[in-house]
Amino acid sequence: MTFVNINRINSIHFPIIIFCVLGIYHTIRPQKEDFKFIKYAVISFISFESFYFTEYNQRISAIFKKGLGEAVEYAEKSAGDNLIYVSSKYMHPEILFYSKFSTTEYIETVKLDNYNQQVMNAVSFGNYRLKIDEQAIPEGGIYIITNGQAGRYKEFGYDVRTFDNVSVAVKKKP
């Protein structure tokens, strides 16, 4: 059995203290060269802020599926006894989160497509049907889809309501 002398790491305290003192010294007493660095740092920070608080929000909203919560809520209100079909772009934990589906009802109604696998995928639960075939449009029901799919559903006679990056298609009543 080998013993390691852990006291050797104590020697690192001296360089840390020296670099902390040097950092504080150069912060308190800036030199001419430091002003150039500070100027570039301020310009970079202002550029970052102007991008982050304006354009970045629109770019990232699709990745974070902005509007999915409102779409699920609208679909549930419109559904009644109809089935709600969910595009394969949205995962079932997201739907569970926004629908506030009862845990006991979920356990009773969930259907899995690969039950004995390490990772199990839900195909349906309650009146939700997940991972629908994007090419075939079954009659009736309500669809939670991406905005890119909305035009196709309008062609088949659906009313499409858009919530930021997510749309809900409901069959028009005759």
Image: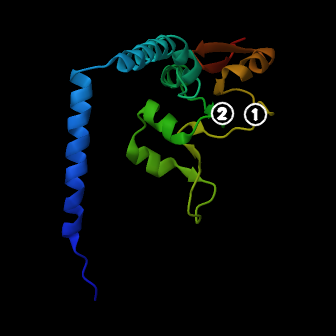
Q: Secondary structure at mark 1?
A: loop
Badge 1, how many Cα within 10 Å: few under 14, some, many 20+? Answer: few
Q: Is residue 158 left or right of residue 34?
A: right
Q: Amino acid type of disc 2?
A: Ser
Q: Quadrant of the N terminus?
A: bottom left
Residue in the picture at 59% in, 24% down = 62
Residue 89 picture quarter: top right
Q: Amino acid type of disc 1?
A: Glu
Q: x, y percentage for residue 108?
A: 46, 51
Tag 1 residue: 134
Q: Nearer the viewer, residue 167 or 174?
A: 167
Answer above or below: position of 108 versus 100: below
Image coloring type: rainbow
Answer above or below: position of 124 versus 28: below
Check if mark 2's residue and mark 1's residue have beta carbons within 8 Å.
yes
Q: Is residue 69 left or right of residue 84?
A: left
Q: Nearer the viewer, residue 120 or 62?
A: 62
Q: Is residue 114 left or right of residue 37?
A: right
Q: Residue furthest front?
A: 32
Q: Quadrant of the C terminus?
A: top right
Residue in the picture at 24% in, 82% down = 3
Q: x, y percentage for residue 92?
A: 54, 41
Q: x, y percentage for residue 58?
A: 56, 15
Tag 2 residue: 87
Residue in the picture at 50% in, 36% down = 94
Q: x, y percentage for residue 123?
A: 61, 47
Q: Secondary structure at mark 2?
A: loop
Q: Residue furthest bottom?
A: 1
